[in-house]
Image: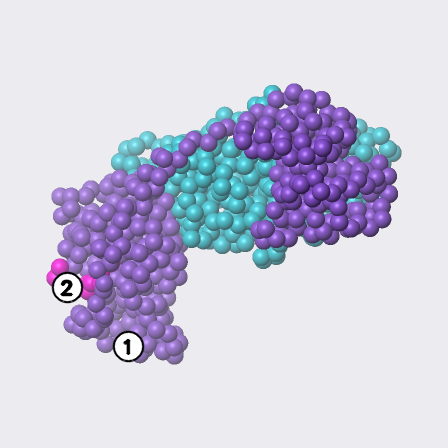
Amino acid sequence: MDSLLNSNRPPVFCPGCSHDRVLHALDQALIEMGFAGKDVAIVTDIGCSGLFDTFFNTHALHGLHGRALTYATGIKMARPELKVIVTMGDGGLGIGGAHVLSTCRRNIDLTLLVLNNFNYGMTGGQCSSTTPHDAVVASGFLNKLEKPVDICQVAGAAGAPMVSRVSTYQKDFVAKLKEAITYDGFSLLDIWGICPGRYTRRNKLTPKSIKANLAQLPELTDFTSKNARMEYGKAYRREAARQKVPSDPVPIAVTCAAPQSGRREVIILGGAGQRIITAGELVCLAGASAGCHATQKNDYPITVMRGHSVSEIILSDEEIEYTGIENPAVVIALAPEGVKRRMKMLEHLSPEALVIKAAGIELSPCQAAVTEIDFRARKIKSPDWALAALAVLAQQKKILTMDMLKAALNLRFKKAIYETALAVIEKVFV
Amino acid sequence: MGISLMEGNEAIGRGAAAAGCNFFAGYPITPATTIYNTMLKLLPPKGGICLQGEDEIASIGFCLGAAMAGMKCMTATSGPGISLYSEQISFAIGSEIPIVIIDVQRLGPSTGSATRGADGDIQFLRWGNSGGLPVIVLAPVNVKDCYVLTVQAFNLAEKYRCPVFVAANKEISMTRETVDLEALDLPPVAERKVADADASFLPFAVKDGQLVPDFLAIGTTILVRQTSSTHGPDGYITTDPEQIEKVQERLDAKIKTNISKFTFHDEYVVPGADTLVIAYGVTARAAKVAVKKLHQSDQSASLLVLKTLWPVPEALIREKAAPYKRVVIAEMNLGQYVRELQQVLTGKEIVFLGQMNGEMIKPGQIMEVIQNG
């Protein structure tokens, strides 16, 4: 097989840079594995490792600092047959740390080559996430204050099944690259090398000392057996194939007639757990089944099962433009939390407005007609109060009719819940 | 008739699917999360891909990679997420990667209010990239627009190989509304123009007069080179000023010179009125109520609703505003798009109504400005 290196762009690194050795070793590995340029995408980060895509005659994507794994993930998900290799330096490792961790957790079939030379070469030799604390770098004393990261330990802990440290100078480097590239899942090679342009000007580092330093590191657990699992893309496709195709939105048939015309505003003031939003939806569906336009605007806090829940509904014969409530025809007040959110509005209700309130809810004096319902006395539980209030409206032929409410329930619920809802409505009529 | 009850975010998701979107990645954020929920339901069973990134940067990065591999991609977020997208948006602009980006705006600045609406990102969407090259921003008024403009956004992203924003608002995206899906006026779905797959392919080459390079996907038989660095037609980094200038001017021209092909708008013309209200997004709805109410009065006004905000449809604005003495603009911020109108309509009286308190601007407020300036 031929070299995958780009004959139009011969590699240019600083003299003695170990990146040059990695480049040729990677080419050797790809040749030995029988890959052609079209089979491989090289995705690179910013910095000197970001030159790799140019020097290879493969598919290539050179993106933003620290983000190489994000593009590589998109490419691999779109083209599972492609061999995707990512190069980044110890700089990219730091700035893109969240992506490294998440890629380990995902176990997508990418090979990440960390070209670790212990400093930011391209910007003048500042400290990176792997700079030893006793190194002399362009960041003054700052690197003395930070502990270098052992990315292999981190990656293994994060779930990467194939993690290995190598020296650019070790004899079996090509074999290690091949092993990582072959692995069906995420593989990470922490490749230690020398940056003669910056780092070794002020720090002693030789192939021999790299070997010694690597040997001193605590040994890696057998992450392959610990973390081995189905590759992410394969697992994704397996799960996706099991998902049910969702049904299209059910068209709402016009089967009823609305009891009033014009713009009708309804506001339901309740608390979490009272199915306020569902009740609002039912009013909309009821309106739509009578040929009305409908809008529903909801307001609730970030907490679940606690706090206010407010639903604002408008029905109209004409297209609804402004979706805010200015002059409600009906107010349903079911919990103090909701009532508190609309105090001002309640003070200015028109005399034509109808308020349905649960027993015990306190309202300031207003001009509207107020109907109080003791839901508890009717053995209706709090989550059903909103539905029961709609039944009261239907009974009075205000906003909706019983036909409209039943049509809405039919659209919204399957048979079992529909029956339960009808039972709640029955209790209102007792 | 096919009336459905649907919120804006679901309509955006369904519009995306109708446009052929087969890749979505997002990070949950109120008020955009239900777009992600919708895509998670729609895409996987049909062989599409829906991913949740570890953050917004990853989510849009997945999309950019997948788009370069030939997929039709969308991501969705709100203001805080757009902030994180910024560097990737610049990449998509400079390297001509098609992507649809939904910004369901919420009240800012910063974390702001997750559940309160705003139109506070209108200038940010235009200028939140390094280099300052133009982008396309569409603004839906209602649920129907959420569907239709998302389809348009995909078509534009594919045609011009660029990011296209849909500037939604919590007040549209999370408001349910009856919509007749069968009655939607949808454009035919557009696809990226594919290059001849031969060895002479250069990823950013254009013929004379052509403004958008033909596309080949990463992973097919012809090698494709993509880079965030300043590049020439071959996709290699370049420092040649002539080559750089050519590319930059083409990136600028491909969006700006085609604006007349995607100047989406609506209008409500009241004969004899001396005031034109200009609005966009959810505020256009209150404006419509206001002009309708004043229709028969002696202080009537017409309405122009802009659905393409960027590039600024200058020709349309000039033409529509010409017959009027005065222009009123209402927007849910403290003065963003009004700056564009002031530049386009020099010499015309422009009255600004802004509000940034988490509430929609009411029809009465707009009427008040029309009547009393």
* Letter of the chain shown cyan in the rendering: B
- Identify the coloring: by chain
Residue A295: name its quadrant: top right
Residue drawn at (51%, 44%) of the image: B76
- Amino acid type shown at disc 1: Arg
In this structure image, what is the colour of chain A? purple
Q: Nearer the viewer, residue A228 or B273?
A: A228
Q: Check the image and report above or below for B5 versus B63.
A: above
Q: Secondary structure at mark 1?
A: helix
* Disc 1 and disc 2 on one polypeptide chain: yes
Is A330 situated left or right of B136 in this image?
right
Q: Where are the magenta residues, as a range?
A: A163-172
Q: Residue A304 at what x, y percent from top left?
A: 57, 51
Is A242 situated left or right of A15 in this image?
right
- Locate the N terminus of chain A and report the quarter of the image it occupies: top left
Give the number of the disc on residue A202.
1
User: Is any part of residue A197 visible from this angle?
Assistant: yes
Residue drawn at (72%, 32%) of the image: A429
- Amino acid type shown at disc 2: Gln
User: Is any part of residue A313 visible from this angle?
Assistant: no
Residue drawn at (66%, 29%) of the image: A405
Q: Which residue is mark 2?
A: A170
Q: Secondary structure at mark 2?
A: loop
